[in-house]
Image: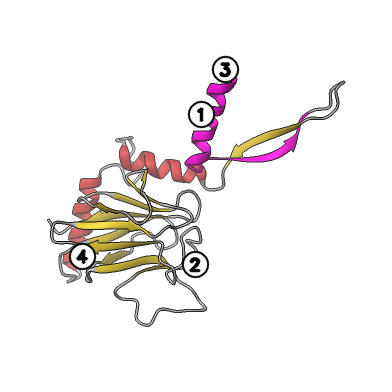
Amino acid sequence: MTYQNTKKHLDRLISISLVQRAAGFGRETDRGIAPVWKYSLADGGLLNLTKTLGIFSSIIPPMGYNDIRERIRAVRTTLDDNGIPAGPVLYLIGGTEDGRAFILKNDRIPMGREDPDHPPAGNEAMVVLPDDYRAVTRVTKPHAFLIRSVESWQIEDNASTGGTFLNSRRLEPLKRTALANGDVIDLSVGANAARFLFISDE
C-alpha cells in the first residue's frame, strides 16, 4: 500500500473517531531524531465500532442492535405495557442511560447535555442527557433540534462542535433533514457521544 493510500485510510479512521493521532518522535538515526505522527486506537473507538456493526449487520450471536425492526417492536411493546401512549420516540442506545425512551411531544425539541450551572426550567419537552455524555453540546446551546413539520419529523444540527450524524452521515449545520422510522441519530461520535434510535408513530 502506498503512503498516500495509507494516509487516506488513516484520515478516514480519524474522522470517524476510531483512531487518534498525536505528534511524537521517531527512532534515532544517523540523521538525528525526526518528528512523526503516532496513531493509536481512540478512547471508546472500538466500542463505538462494535455498536455500529451491531446495528447494521446480522452478526450471530446477536450483539443487541442487529435488527432494527425487532428492536423497534420490543420498545413499542414495552411502552404499551407501561401505559405510555404510542407516538414518536427517541430510544437512547449505550452509555449510562442505555434504554431510556424520550417521548416527543412538542413541535420543536432541543437536544443536549444538562448544564449544572443553568438547569432547564422543566425539561419534559427537551431531550436532556446527563454529563456522562460529555461529547454532546449542552442544552443551553442545544446540540440539535427535533422539529415536527406537516410532512415529517426533521432533525437540525445547531452548529455543534462534534456534529450530528444521521445513519452515519454527518448533517450540514442549521439545515433540516427528514427522519424516517428506524433512523439512527448520533450526537457527536466516539466516546461519550449519544446514539438514538428514532421510532416514528407510523
Q: Amino acid at mark 2?
A: Asp
Dividing the image into 4 quarters, which one contains the C terminus? bottom left
Residue 197 lies left or right of residue 77; in this view the side is right
Numbered range of the magenta stretch: 1-26
Sequence order check, earlier mark of 4 and 1: 1
* Residue 105 forms part of the magenta stretch: no
Sequence order check, earlier mark of 2 and 3: 3
Sequence order check, earlier mark of 2 and 1: 1
Which residue was labeled with disc 3? 2
The residue mark sitting in front, 2 or 3, is: 3
Sequence order check, earlier mark of 4 and 3: 3
In percent of width and height, residue 39 lies at 63, 36
The residue mark sitting in front, 2 or 1, is: 1
The label shown at residue 79 is 4
Instruction: Count residues near mark 4 (Cα–Cα under 10 Å), then give few for <14, some for 14-19, many for 20+.
Output: some
Q: Amino acid at mark 1?
A: His
Dividing the image into 4 quarters, which one contains the N terminus? top right
Distance from the alpha carbon under mark 4 to that under mark 1: 42 Å
Helix, strand or loop under label 2:
loop
Q: Amino acid at mark 4?
A: Leu
Distance from the alpha carbon under mark 4 to that under mark 3: 53 Å
In percent of width and height, residue 161 lies at 48, 56
Sequence order check, earlier mark of 3 and 1: 3
Which residue lies at the image location 48% right of the left edge and 79% below the top edge? 118
